[in-house]
């Protein structure tokens, strides 16, 4: 007698053959990094001395989200480790997500733990419980015991609470903290102005090479998605689906992550509707879903008043045709109305200014300074970078929950 669950689950996916290829954290094989040949070559040149056991250049990589910065840094680092091994040089790399490990202590612990081999060093690197200086001492001992060269990738470096770890890493050899191991740092940031707020001493020792990754164009995005099209079963992709997704993504942001998200969501829409073809028309629906999910993730954990401020800007954007943003005073007026509707006391104008700055730092909004002459003085305008419909829908949905 057949099991009752047989009809509940689909044993064979009619749309996806290898869905993992469409996950953001999937590191493509060598043939899958598309449109970044020059960037990979430049980065490889900067760290090339490491394959001979010499000091690699420290590097800062800038570029908007989804331009391949982390992907290329990991790829070049892994290739360096493999090539160095062929030259008899012991090399490795450590990856730190600074959005998660925001403090100096967390970042040092992550680095030390990822490069350690306790069986060879007899050194323990616990998750917590040690002072920052003790983590550093253990890291230096591990590096000298195991490696000739180590690359450390600090992704979203602008999320670090201070520059202290950059000072320690970039000057470890010079300060005599490590004797036999050479150290290189690859810092990655979405914000090209990040360097402006760095300590001058760190800037002088860290910023040896700087590279800017431009957004992908439509042809590059099409190639990126074509390279991952074997995520789908044969003949399920409509020939116009990838070109449509590429054109849409290139026009709006040039972000490969979002483009891949759109393609994956289009496949899921086909799945959920019982279609046997991933049609071009699913791309528009998928784009809306991708933007909604991304924005929801972006504001996850934010405070109610942080959301009210965004809601005010979304309301202004939807009810006005102005393209250059809205003054702080106007945003504050609408924010106060929302607070009244929610039965909440409003924050001060100064605090709302701070919240707007935080949203600008996350690239949710854009701020611009203006001068009104002697009569008005200077003022700031704020403009949503997100789709106001998406912002309003997500924030309203959260209120209803």
Image (spheres, rainbow, N blue to C red):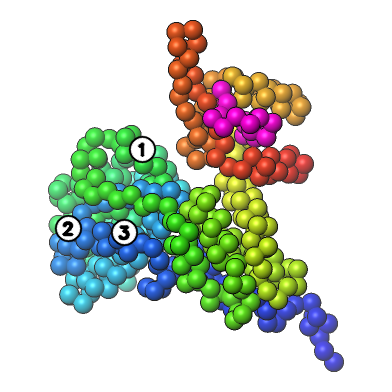
Residue appearing at x 78%, y 83% in the figure: 6
Q: Secondary structure at mark 1?
A: helix
Vertical side of 272 occupied by 323: above or below: above
Total numbered badges shown on the rendered structure: 3
Between the residue at mark 1 and the residue at mark 2, the CA separation in whole angstroms equals 27 Å
Residue under label 3: 39
3 vs 1, front mark = 3
Q: Which residues are magenta?
A: 308-327
Circle 3: element type: helix
Q: Is residue 245 magenta?
A: no
Viewer-nearest of labels 3 and 2?
3
Kindly identify which numbered label has been placed on residue 343.
none
Q: Nearer the viewer, residue 140 or 2?
A: 2
Give the number of the disc on residue 193.
Answer: 1
Residue at far bottom of view: 1
x 72%, y 23%: residue: 337
Image location (x, y in percent) of residue 203: 24, 40
Residue at which label 2 appears: 55
Q: Earlier along the polypeptide chain: callout 3 or callout 1? A: 3
């Amino acid at each position: 007698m057949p099991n009752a669950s047989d009809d509940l689950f689909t044993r064979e996916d009619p749309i996806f053959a290898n869905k993992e290829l469409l996950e953001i954290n999937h590191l493509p094989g060598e043939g899958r990094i598309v449109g970044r040949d020059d960037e990979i070559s430049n980065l490889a040149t900067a760290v090339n001395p490491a394959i001979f056991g010499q000091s690699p250049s420290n590097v800062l990589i800038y570029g908007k989200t989804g331009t391949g910065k982390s992907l290329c840094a990991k790829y070049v680092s892994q290739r360096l480790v493999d090539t160095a091994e062929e030259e008899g040089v012991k090399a490795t790399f450590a990856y730190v997500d600074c959005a998660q490990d925001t403090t100096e202590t967390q970042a040092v612990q992550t680095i030390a733990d990822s490069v350690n081999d306790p069986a060879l060093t007899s050194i323990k690197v616990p998750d917590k419980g040690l002072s920052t200086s003790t983590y550093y001492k253990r890291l230096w001992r591990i590096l000298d015991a195991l490696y000739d060269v180590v690359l450390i990738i600090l992704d979203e470096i602008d999320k670090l609470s201070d520059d202290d770890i950059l000072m320690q890493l970039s000057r470890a050899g010079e300060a005599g903290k490590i004797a036999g191991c050479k150290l290189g740092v690859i810092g990655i940031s979405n914000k090209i102005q990040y360097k402006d707020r760095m300590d001058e001493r760190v800037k002088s020792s860290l910023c040896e090479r700087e590279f800017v990754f431009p957004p992908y164009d439509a042809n590059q995005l099409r190639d990126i998605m074509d390279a991952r099209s074997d995520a789908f079963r044969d003949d399920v992709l409509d020939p116009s689906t990838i070109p449509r997704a590429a054109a849409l993504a290139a026009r709006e942001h040039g972000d490969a992550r979002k483009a891949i998200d759109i393609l994956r969501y289009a496949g899921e829409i086909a799945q959920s509707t019982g279609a046997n073809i991933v049609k071009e028309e699913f791309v528009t629906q998928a784009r809306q879903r991708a933007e909604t999910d991304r924005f929801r993730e972006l504001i996850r954990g934010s405070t109610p008043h942080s959301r009210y401020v965004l809601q005010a800007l979304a309301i202004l954007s939807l009810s006005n045709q102005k393209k250059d943003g809205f003054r702080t005073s106007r945003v504050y007026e609408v924010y106060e109305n929302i607070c009244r509707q929610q039965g909440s006391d409003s924050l001060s104008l100064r605090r709302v200014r701070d919240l707007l700055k935080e949203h600008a730092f996350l690239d949710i909004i854009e701020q611009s300074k203006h001068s009104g002459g002697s009569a008005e003085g200077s003022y700031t305008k704020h403009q949503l970078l997100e789709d106001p419909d998406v912002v309003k829908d997500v924030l309203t949905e959260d209120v209803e929950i």
